[in-house]
Each structure stands twice: as structure tokens, then as C-alpha cells.
Amino acid sequence: MNITITIDKSTFQMLSYNELLRLSNYYRHNVAPVLVMEILGDLKKEAPEGKVPADRVTEFASKLFPTQCVVNAYYRTLVKGELLGNAIQMDGRPTLDIEKIVQTDDGRKGFVIEETAAEQAVYKWKDGKFTEADHELSQLWRTITTQEDLLKNLQKNLKAATPDRLKSLEELNAKVQSVLADPERQESLLVYLIDNYGEGEINGATPFTRWLEAGRPLLKDFIPYCAHCLKIDLLFHLGLQSELIGTKATNRVDLEYLYYLPFCNVFTSDDKIHKQLAPLLVRKNQQFITGAELKKDFKGIVEYLEKEGEAAKKKFSAEPPIIEESLTFKLWKEYFGYPKTSNMDRNISPEELEHMKRQMDKFIKASKGEKVVFEEGESEEFIVKKSYMSPNDPCFCMSGKKVTDCCIPMEEFIRLSVKDKG
């Protein structure tokens, strides 16, 4: 059972290590790539005259990827893919970069997930390796996100081009909805998407031909993920024009989190622009939670478990404690009927464990094989994702202990590390 959550930098910084660790036990943390870049820029801000301290790099990295985390595929890549005809699922599940399709000896097919650049960077940071390239990138990011004049100039130009001002966020949303629903505007909106997101890599004739052959439908029905991104762009630019959205330099960066809303059940932030726009973009079955609300919830959960002791920590390692006023408990109750559907008392037999291990071995073996393709009507039956684990990471059994103090003793951890490198 999983509730997928995407966390922006403001909430990430509010949560302590123990709070974030508990969160990743009760939610699947889908990391927006922009979070890694924002943290990179902040590390540079902390040491503007010199090198970023290695201990700060390691500290941030250890909080970024406790257990149960994935990194979503980059939103611009997804837009380009949908323009070319690749369907994008928008049901709250993460969308990941696929390296290849593979097949087991008994004929089952599945995905091998590609390691993203963001993950590779964090793996290095966990070992305290902050390269010169990272320093240069962090400096560039800080420069981009401190150029407040860029948004001020854009706002001025937009106001000059269209003097009509919208007076509220409700009016802004209604205006954008009317633009997206106007059949006469669909062609120009499609041109905008190709120009803005194609990055010179898309032959505009391909999406246009598909659109024409489909009977010129509304883009929200033809390419729904592109339409979601388009709505964000329109809200931002028309909001700037009417001075409903401020010219804070980081607003354009913060906007990126909203492109990942289709890939989570819960989005959390304490930033003003997210509080303004997220309610206009979330699905009916999706929640926007402020960072302050989430911080309060997990502070209470951690304090409760500390008070109740080790037995409670073990009992509620994978499912939240039954605290009626807890926001997380309420979400589990809403999504899963918890605690009636709880797995807490389920005992897995040795035979079941052995069967699961054999299946995993088959999948891992297949992941090292040659790529295959899906035949018509086929879909994935398993997913293999390789992740880095440092000896200081929390154990995958969700005990809260370091992995080398729990399921894999240090000697065995070193042996497995050497074997993997070999």
C-alpha cells in the first residue's frame, strides 16, 4: 500500500531526518528533479567564497533518499514524448525513465529503470564527493535563481502587451480554463508547446499530423499531460501580467514542482506560489498539504513513537500509528480503509519468503540480459531498479536503524559492495 508524495524544498528543509525517515515509511516519496538542483544551489549559498563543506553535502544527501524513494522522469522529456505519441499516465503514480525491457527465462517481461543524473549526484554526495563540476553547476543555479529583474521585466512586458487585469485567482483560473477550452485556440497552443518544449528535437509535423488525423480535438483530450503543463504556464504568465503572482526570483523555479502533480497523490509545500496555484491544479482525489501541516503531523508521530518505545516503533514501522487527529492516519483511512486493511499482523511463512527470493533472483538475472520489446497487448509484470546504499543509510526493513546495525553487518556489507563492483 502506497500513497505517493512529492515534497518541495521548503517542506524538505522543515522536516528533521527522523521525520523524513518516518514519512518515507508511510508514503512513497517521488522526488522532483528540481529538488536536487535547489539543494545544490543552497549548498553554494552557504559557502559563497569557497568550497561547500563535505559534511553539509553528506547531510543533505542522507535526507534526500531514505528508503521508499524514486526520482521522477524530467517533465520536459515527458512533454516531448507525449507530443510524439507516447501516452503519459497521470494517476498519481511516479513516471520513471525506462532503460530497457527485459524477459525472464519463464517468459515474463518487465522494465529496468534507468538511473537518473539526480540520483547519480546524490550517490556521490552521500560519500562526501562534491566535484568541481558540482561546484560550477551550483554557482550557475544560484545565479539563475537570484536574477529577480528577469521576472520583473517579463511582468512589465506582459502588462504592456495585454492591459486587461484579472482581479483574483478565481478569475485567473476561469480565464485559463476558457483559453484551454476554446477550439479556435488549439492550433496556436500546439505551436506553443512544440516551440517551447520541443527544444529543436521535434519535427512539428509529427504532432500536427496526429492532431489533424484525430479530428482537431481539444489538447486536454489529445495530449493531457501537455495540457497540464500548458495550464501551469498560462496561470503563471497571466498571473504575472495581472500582478497576482509576484516577481520573486525563485518563483519560476518553484513552478517546476507543479509539473509533477500528475505523478503523486499528495503535494506539500510552504511556498506562497504553491499555495496560490496548487489548489487550481490538483485532481479531485489529490491533496495539497502545507509544509507546516506536514511538519506538525510528523513531529507528533515521532514524539508518539519515542514515548511508546521500541515495541511501537516496530509495530508501526510500515504503517502509521493509529492517532485519530493525525493527518497521515486520516489519509491512510481514506485511501485504504486503514486500520481494517492493515498488514501488521500478517506472518509470512519461510516457504513464502523463499518463493519471493526465487522470483527476485529471476528478475535480477533478467535485468542483466538483452533488451526485448513488448508485443501487442503485453505490459510489464515486474520492475527492477538498482539503487545505491551507503553503510549509514536506514535499513530497508524500515526499523529506523542503520543498515549495518540491522540486517547487513558491516563485514557482509563490505563483501557485497566488493562483489557488486566486481
Image (cartoon, rainbow, N blue to C red):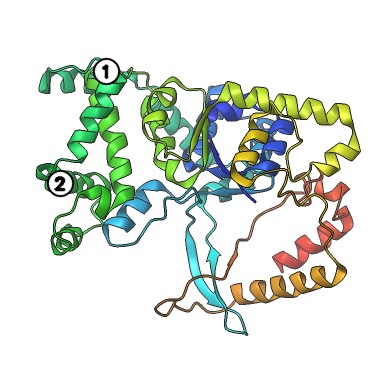
Q: Residues within 10 Å of mark 2 (few under 14, many from 20)?
A: some
**Relative to 358, residue 325 above or below:** above
- Determine the secondary structure under disc 1: helix
Quadrant housing residue 317: top right
Give coordinates of residue 65: x percent, y percent: 64, 43
Q: Is residue 89 left or right of residue 394?
A: left
Q: Look at label 2 and name its amino acid.
A: Gln
Q: Residue at x 21, y 18 (%)?
A: 166
Where is mark 1, residue-wise? Answer: 152
The C terminus appears in which quarter of the rendering?
bottom right
Q: Residues within 10 Å of mark 1 (few under 14, many from 20)?
A: some
User: Which comes before the other along the chain, label 1 or label 2?
Assistant: 1
- The answer to whether 383 appears left or right of 198 in the picture is right
Q: Residue at x 24, y 28 (%)?
A: 174
Q: Which residue is pictured at 30% across the width and 48% down the height?
A: 226
Question: Element under label 2?
Answer: helix
| Spot occupied by residue 408 in the image (x, y as percentages of width and height) | 85, 56
Q: Position of residue 233 (x, y in %)?
A: 28, 35
The image quadrant that residue 39 belongs to is: top right
* 37, above or below 199, in the image: above
State how far apart marks 1 and 2 are (Cα).
Answer: 29 Å
Amino acid type at image mark 1: Lys
Evaluate whether residue 198 shows in this view: no
